Image (cartoon, rainbow, N blue to C red):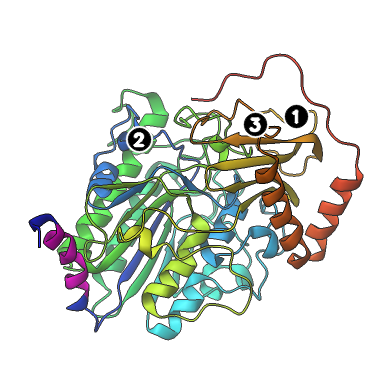
Amino acid sequence: MLRRDFLHLLPAAGLASQTSRPPNIVVIFADDLGYGDVGCQGSRIRTPAIDRLAAGGMRFTHGITANPVCSPSRAGLLTGRYPTRCGVPNVFFPRDEQGMNLDEQTLADLLKPRGYRSACIGKWHLGHHKPWLPTSRGFDSYYGIPYSNDMRPTWLMRDTEVIEENADQTTITRRYTEEAVRFIQSAGREPFFLYMPHTFPHIPLFASEKFRGKSRHGIYGDVVEELDWSVGEVLNALAKQGVDRNTLVLFSSDNGPWYQGSSGGLRGRKGMTWEGGVRVPFIARWPARIPRGRVCHSLVSTLDLVPTVCGITGTALPAKPIDGSDILPLLTGQRASIERDPILYFMGRALHAARWGNWKLHIARHNAEMYSAAPAAGRMSLLLSQPELYNLELDPDESADVAPENPEVVQRIRAHIDQVIPGFPEDIRQAWKTMLDTPTAPRPTGTFPAKAG
């Protein structure tokens, strides 16, 4: 056996010695952090802890989120199901009296029978009244702002109680981090699930005195560098507790960048189904199983968290349809790619696009504001007069429509859509029917806006 082959077997051997305890799960989820906002993906903002996380595990170049806006993205991450199945087609606001459907099971719900302690620390955004808060959705504890930090009042909550009517956001990243470290320190021998959805870099932006004015990229850089510090503190806490080797850490973002931040040269931003709105940092580290320093170019989604963790821990999946895939063969390096059905891209209740491997089919877009950089929840969507197909391997900018040359690919993706849409809730089926029955959007003329960077 070659030495390099022997070394590749060591992570698996390490896991075999730890089979008495399932791995801990840590999910760090940034808010509006762009694909190009971390150092290991070309950013000039200093992110040494996130870069260290990638160097110690696997970085995915085609990681996408479940939806290009806040609440739906989080619903998809925690259930493994399209947000449009979960009653979360759009963003929740403080005026909303409900949240994600109560018959949905979160990853915390699923892991509880396996003996996991769980905590949610940060932005929840799936309903801020008691029946919809984390402590009613499988988590043992909650500490954070229950929705976006630009919504008023900006409550800071512990479990179900408001402890600050308007949270001091200059210290919120530090306080989230201190809370996460205490949770890790208190874990003992029980496996734990830490879900840490950060408030930033969603606007308005705030940084603590330690970081304010210290980056070379204004307040946005300050905020991202403090977020990176937080990642480092969580990793250090895992190491000090002696549990880092058997802890799966996933770092990602809920969608692409909004007004600031970098999409890494991809077209589009938050609120858009171009790749810049949906492709996000996606980094996983688990020293017992994931080889160090790997880069994977296979398509993965935040929808994959639930089926992957359930597969790793031997946890039963819900009876409802799961839209993500178990990506453990990618994480361990056993496979360079996996077969999977096309992934659907919704905005509100409207299906806009679908991705199958490197193929991306655009079917619909928002009408007069279809190219606006602002989030587009609630706008009318119109079917394109002709679907647009892009080969993202050759054309990451989504600038050269190759649908006429590849009718079989268009038909394959459309056939999948026609097959699965009848299984969605009535409001989604009706939205699809309405869009099909509505006059199509004319092809735009003139020059497209420059790709966002």
Residue identified by numbered label 3: 402
Q: Are marks 1 and 3 in contact (CB under 8 Å)?
A: no
Disc 3 and disc 2 in contact, CB within 8 angstroms: no
Q: Nearer the viewer, mark 1 or mark 3?
A: 3
Q: Quadrant of residue 5?
A: bottom left
Is residue 320 in the magenta section? Answer: no
* Picture residue at 63% right of the left edge, 66% below the top: 129
Amino acid type, residue under disc 3 in the picture: Val
Percent of width and height locating residue 310: 44, 74
Report the amino acid beneath label 2.
Gln
Seen in the picture, residue 360 relative to 372 is either above or below; the reply is below
- Residue at figure coordinates x 32%, y 40% from the top left: 226
Is residue 76 something one can see in this rendering? yes
Nearer the camera: disc 3 or disc 2: 3
Segment colored magenta: 5-15
Find residue 174 and report its horizontal and vertical position in percent.
Answer: 33, 49
Which residue position is annotated with label 2?
A: 41
Disc with the residue nearer the chain's start (3 vs 2): 2
Q: Residue at x 30, y 48 (%)?
A: 230
Give the answer, above or below, for where 236 lies relative to 63.
below
- Of residue 157 and residue 57, the one placed in the foreground of this image is 57
Q: Earlier in the sequence, mark 1 or mark 3?
A: 1
Provide the major secondary structure of the magenta segment.
Answer: helix
Marker disc for residue 213 = none
Alpha carbons under labels 2 and 1: distance apart: 30 Å
Gap between marks 1 and 3, in whole Å?
Answer: 24 Å
In this figure, which residue is indicated by the disc labeled 1? 369
